[in-house]
Image (tube, grey):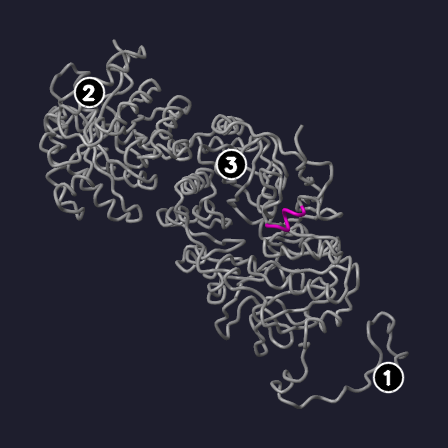
């Protein structure tokens, strides 16, 4: 070997010095090795200690177990027992099941929350001013972008996984055996696993290496804890999401399908996304029939995936499924079974910093709690001002899709859905194209060509003001919600700029 | 000429039942595309709810906009004492057509008409403005169908109410054979009086196949339409009543030939070498009316 000095331009060659031999090679079988050398720690507490978590740091969770999640509560209980304080809890979303966090907020374990949504008692308490620091609400795409850019830095991610091997290859299902609590895709967890400083997988199902296919690769995972219980299968998913029988939802769904067709986005090779709400799910049924009648195909369906979408894939009507979250058991089973039902992460789904699948959507069907005469949409706060929803991918898909269709009943009970100004802007009217209600359709004036096409197809197009007037004629004008001056939530658009704030509700006596 | 609230001759493919005590359903009834809406004060309303339903329907008629739909209210039997109060609430409120339940004889129609006329007069409404229809729900009523259909000039149609009728017959509803006589009788009675014939409800909402079979049957028999109890039944019902492309083409060809003959000043029109008879023209006109009704967007 030449002396390094004799190698020309050695200073331009990246190297780590001279070869000095290798450590002894292992000789045990890989099966023996996985049993003795792996990332599995004996307890949750041991894993927490190993991560080096300190007061004031940020922990993260995913919401693929939905209302059945037992991970968040168990981890935060453990952190409280271990004396941690001032933590930021950054979950991809939170549900009613997370009400025990109220206690941990009161005792100072959790002082900051980032999430896509809140429901139940936790949401009620936060709306009443439980926290000093406002909750930060981000869309799924906005969260993925913030994690990548470092605006949301995750110190330790605690990720529940229905299957994981001893090195950390983790997934929402397993090809080896039937798993009662399979959640299907783990798309939102993948972003956390990739960018968090430390990653702990909590699994109830330690499977043999290699757990392929995996959602999270072992090189993103530091520690594994085997838990008896990571979630309640009933709350995670049950059977197939049912088609609605509600005639009003069916009417809205049918109109939405007609609108998409008339607007020119229903052609051979189109792409689509639809939510799991009654009307948007029912739209799948009408679109399916229209596809059969016209003999056309969908190139890909994106997003939260339902059994109905999976069935259309199996029927040959949809070529590819890009699945960031499986909404029901049938969707999860399809992900396991069907080669072209493909699992994607939150970043690829919707981050504005990446090439995102939402940008390839022809149309999306979205729901709404409120829509205003500027076409702004609220999916986060109820008509009483209390937080009771989640942003999800609403602004991401509305912005990405060539045609965004928002479906909602014109009134809910005695509450109008279309009003002068939504209580909370989640998705700006600039990216909302058509509003479909049971009492008529309105097209955003930004899209006059769509209005023209709908009229040509015999669909009566109202102005949004006319729909608002119709709603008010039916149920009147509700009193404005009373808020205090205090901000309890900050809502970020998908580019992580602040688009609106949520105030504490005022429950004091009226004069 | 007196202004009438009803038109004898109009499209009545679907008459949607709406319980009179359900404000949400009343407010939404308009949106599902039914040709006629029927607010019920009778069987779908519990005895303890009768007042509330009457009050609600009265206010709905006065305040809600139902577009161009025909608005029918099914009242309680006059003999119950409730029927009169129903009439007193709905006639001043502007109901188009009063539906009599359990009509057994022409006298039932005459008695009700008398009350309607009295209330119209008391409220300054032209006497005769309100239409009527009679539901026949017993063996006796079926046998009297002809007299019932001719009992009043206000009648826009007669309808079969099958549940009570099959009980009266000591049978149950099955494949439709049990209703064949009643349907034929009611249809012929209606046609001989020049009014509409409306079929009974199909109550198994989830059995779409069975519903369509029944709709096809009544269409072949000649009924104008049918009562529906769920908005989901409207679209398949209307779809069945839409003429086929082929029939429609022929109907347009017939009307073109007639127009051409008229232009020539000739009283005799022919198509493909065949003379067009009057019944052929009437059938063609009806077919075109049905097809156009199905394509019309309701403008408000």
Q: Whole-percent x and y of residue B215?
A: 22, 41
Calculate the distance from the C-alpha at mark 3 to the C-alpha at mark 2.
47 Å
Q: Are marks 2 and 1 in contact (CB under 8 Å)?
A: no
Q: Nearer the viewer, mark 3 or mark 2?
A: 3
Q: Nearer the viewer, mark 3 or mark 1?
A: 3
Q: Tell me if residue B250 comes above or below residue A187 in the rendering.
A: above
Q: Are marks 3 and 2 in contact (CB under 8 Å)?
A: no
Badge 3 sits on which subunit?
A: A
Q: Which residue is mark 3?
A: A435
Pick whichever, B205 or A173, lies toward us: B205
Q: Which mark is residue A2?
A: 1
Tag 2 and tag 1 share a subunit: no
Q: Quadrant of residue B32?
A: top left
Q: Tell me if residue B69 comes above or below residue A227 in the rendering.
A: above
Mark 1 burial class by Cα count in 10 Å: few <14, some 14-19, many 20+: few
Tag 3 and tag 2 share a subunit: no
Badge 1 sits on which subunit?
A: A
Q: Is residue A331 visible?
A: yes
Q: Name which residue lies at 63% across and 69% down.
A: A202
Magenta segment = A120-126
């Amino acid at each position: 070997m030449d002396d390094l000095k004799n190698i020309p331009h050695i200073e331009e060659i990246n190297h780590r010095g001279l070869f000095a031999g290798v450590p002894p090679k292992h000789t045990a079988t890989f099966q023996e090795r996985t049993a003795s050398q792996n990332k599995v720690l004996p307890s949750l507490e041991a894993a927490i200690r190993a991560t080096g978590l300190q007061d004031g740091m940020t922990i993260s969770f995913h919401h693929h177990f939905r209302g059945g999640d037992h991970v968040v509560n168990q981890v935060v209980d453990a952190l409280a027992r271990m004396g941690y304080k001032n933590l930021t809890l950054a979950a991809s979303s939170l549900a009613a099941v997370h009400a025990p966090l109220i206690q941990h907020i009161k005792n100072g374990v959790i002082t900051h929350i980032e999430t896509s949504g809140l429901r139940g008692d936790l949401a009620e308490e936060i709306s009443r001013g439980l926290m000093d620091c406002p909750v930060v609400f981000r869309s799924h795409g906005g969260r993925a972008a913030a994690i990548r850019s470092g605006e949301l830095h995750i110190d330790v991610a605690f990720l529940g996984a229905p299957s994981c091997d001893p090195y950390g290859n983790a997934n929402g299902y397993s090809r080896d055996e039937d798993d009662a609590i399979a959640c299907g895709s783990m798309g939102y967890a993948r972003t956390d696993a990739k960018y968090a400083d430390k990653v702990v997988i909590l699994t109830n199902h330690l499977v043999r290496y290699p757990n392929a296919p995996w959602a999270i690769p072992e090189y993103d995972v530091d520690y594994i804890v085997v838990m008896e219980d990571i979630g309640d299968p009933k709350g995670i998913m049950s059977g197939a999401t049912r088609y609605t029988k509600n005639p009003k939802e069916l009417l809205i769904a049918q109109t939405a399908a007609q609108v998409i067709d008339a607007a020119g986005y229903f052609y051979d090779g189109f792409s689509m996304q639809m939510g799991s709400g009654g009307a948007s799910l029912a739209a799948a049924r009408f679109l399916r029939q229209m596809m059969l009648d016209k003999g056309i195909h969908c190139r890909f369906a994106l997003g939260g995936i339902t059994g109905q979408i999976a069935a259309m894939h199996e029927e040959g009507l949809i070529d590819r499924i890009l699945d960031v979250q499986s909404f029901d058991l049938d969707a999860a089973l399809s992900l396991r079974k069907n080669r072209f039902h493909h699992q994607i992460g939150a970043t690829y789904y919707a981050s504005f910093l990446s090439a995102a699948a939402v940008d390839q959507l022809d149309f999306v069907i979205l729901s709404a709690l409120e829509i205003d005469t500027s076409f702004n949409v609220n999916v986060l706060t109820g008509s009483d001002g209390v937080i009771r929803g989640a942003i999800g991918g609403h602004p991401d898909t509305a912005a990405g899709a060539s045609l965004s269709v928002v479906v909602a009943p014109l009134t809910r009970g005695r509450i109008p859905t279309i009003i002068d100004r939504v209580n909370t802007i989640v998705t700006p009217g600039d990216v909302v194209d058509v509003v479909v209600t049971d009492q008529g359709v309105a097209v955003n004036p930004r899209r006059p060509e769509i209005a023209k096409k709908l009229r040509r197809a015999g669909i009566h197009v109202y102005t949004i003001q006319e729909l608002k007037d119709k709603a008010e004629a039916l149920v009147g004008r509700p009193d404005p919600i009373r808020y205090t001056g205090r901000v309890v939530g900050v809502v970020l658009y998908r580019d992580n700029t602040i688009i609106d704030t949520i105030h504490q509700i005022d429950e004091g006596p009226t004069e | 000429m007196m202004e009438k609230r009803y038109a004898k001759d109009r499209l009545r493919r679907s008459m949607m039942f709406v319980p009179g005590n359900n404000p949400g359903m009343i407010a939404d009834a308009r949106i599902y595309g039914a040709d006629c809406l029927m607010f019920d004060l009778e069987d779908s309303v519990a005895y303890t709810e009768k007042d509330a339903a009457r009050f609600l329907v009265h206010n709905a008629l006065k305040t809600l906009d139902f577009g161009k739909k025909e608005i029918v209210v099914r009242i309680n039997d006059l003999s119950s004492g409730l029927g009169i109060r129903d009439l007193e609430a709905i006639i001043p409120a502007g109901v188009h057509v009063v539906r009599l339940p359990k009509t057994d004889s022409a006298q039932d129609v005459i008695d009700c008409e008398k009350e309607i006329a009295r209330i119209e007069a008391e409220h300054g409404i032209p006497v005769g403005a309100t239409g009527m229809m009679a539901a026949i729900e017993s063996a006796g009523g079926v046998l009297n169908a002809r007299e019932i259909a001719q009992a009043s000039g206000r009648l826009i149609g007669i309808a079969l109410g099958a549940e009570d009728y099959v009980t009266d017959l000591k049978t149950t509803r099955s494949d439709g054979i049990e209703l064949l006589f009643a349907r034929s009788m009611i249809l012929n009675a209606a046609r001989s009086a020049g009014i509409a014939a409306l079929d009974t409800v199909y109550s198994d909402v989830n059995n779409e196949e069975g519903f369509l079979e029944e709709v096809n049957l009544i269409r072949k028999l000649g009924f104008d339409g049918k009562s529906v109890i769920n908005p989901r039944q409207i679209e398949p019902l209307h779809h069945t009543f839409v003429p086929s492309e082929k029939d429609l083409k022929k109907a347009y060809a017939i009307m073109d030939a007639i127009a051409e003959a008229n232009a020539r000043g000739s009283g005799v029109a022919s198509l493909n070498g065949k003379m067009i008879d009057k019944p052929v023209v009437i059938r063609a006109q009806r077919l075109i009316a049905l097809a156009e009704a199905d394509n019309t967007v309701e403008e408000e």
